[in-house]
Amino acid sequence: MASHNLAHIKIDELEVIGYSVAGEETVVAMPQLDVCFDIGKAPDQVIPINNILLTHGHMDHAAGIAYYLSHRNFCGLSPGTILAPENLLGPMKEVISAWSRLDGNKLPAKLVGVKAGDEYQIKPNLLARVFPTKHCRGSVGYSVIERRKKLKPEYTQLTGPQIVELKKQGVEIDYPLELPIVTYLGDTQYVDFSQLKYIAQSRILIAECTFYETEHTARAQAGKHMFVDEFNKLVEKLQNEHIVITHTTQRTPMREIRRILKEVLSPETYDKIILLMANRRW
């Protein structure tokens, strides 16, 4: 039985499942890509996913690490892989060690420390690229990118045997092509992410927009989160086809969040917006 009532969103051939409420819990998974961005409290639905991409160590994003490892071990699964900012690896190992002692069973774990600019191969043609965010020490975001090879224009009219012959001769007949599928910002203050092409051109952007009312601007600054005006400034510079909003505050009713977004964003951008927690009532 599912342990959480997660949101389910279908975007083309991909599914986004998750739960993200500011200060409570954030976990966002894309099963077809075999990735889960942040782990929240480790709902059962994400346990089979093999790659956890942790953005930072705050409790509402990282509390489920030990349960994820323990439950996979209980189910006879491999430990999976947890990518996390390098500065978190020491504390994470301490937490896992402590839970192993409490549980009475060793928790197998594959932890990979990452920093901005790193890449990690998820599947043969799929990688996670790491970039810096502005939230807390070491915090990062991730883009999941598909790599393909494309035939150079001058060879597109050749037959199969001709292409095979050129390959035998060592001729480079193709070039690498990157297709950014999804970018997950995690928690962050405003950053001009349009400077990074793979973020600007990601088909799907999953981004926090935590605060919406003028009296909450100080809270946004103090917690290093995005206010709706900053969110607008960010997304207007990007070319994403779909934008999923996470980490919404409970201080503002969802109907009011919708109204403010419609008022602040351009009609073209508003049409791209999906609120992950749209069906949650508060």
Image: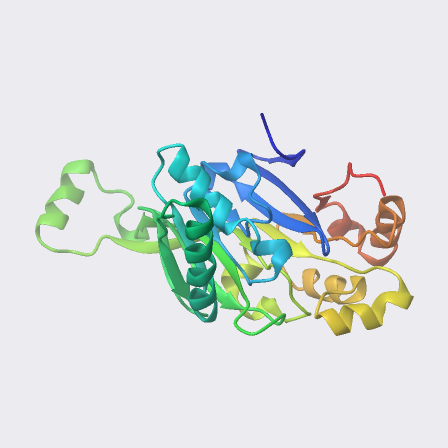
Residue at image coords 42%, 38%: 72
Q: Is residue 200 above or below residue 77?
A: below
Name the outermost residue toward the left.
169
Depth check, front residue: 237 or 150: 237
Q: Is residue 9 left or right of residue 105?
A: right
Residue at image coords 54%, 35%: 44
Q: Quadrant of the N terminus?
A: top right
Residue at image coords 77%, 49%: 270
Depth check, front residue: 18 or 205: 18
Observer able to see residue 198: yes
Q: Is residue 229 left or right of residue 247?
A: right
Name the outermost residue toward the top.
1
Depth check, front residue: 136 or 71: 71
Whole-percent x, y for residue 181 in the image: 50, 48
Whole-percent x, y for residue 113 in the image: 40, 64
Whole-percent x, y for residue 231 in the image: 73, 62
Q: What is the tally of numbered marks visible in this picture?
A: 0
Q: How is the image coloured?
A: rainbow
Residue at image coords 62%, 58%: 59
Q: Is residue 189 above or below residue 54?
A: below
Residue 57 position by quadrant: bottom right
Q: Quadrant of the C terminus?
A: top right
Q: Is residue 206 above or below residue 46?
A: below
Whole-percent x, y for residue 148 in the image: 34, 48
Q: Is residue 138 above or below residue 63?
A: below
Residue 230 position by quadrant: bottom right
Observer able to see residue 239: no
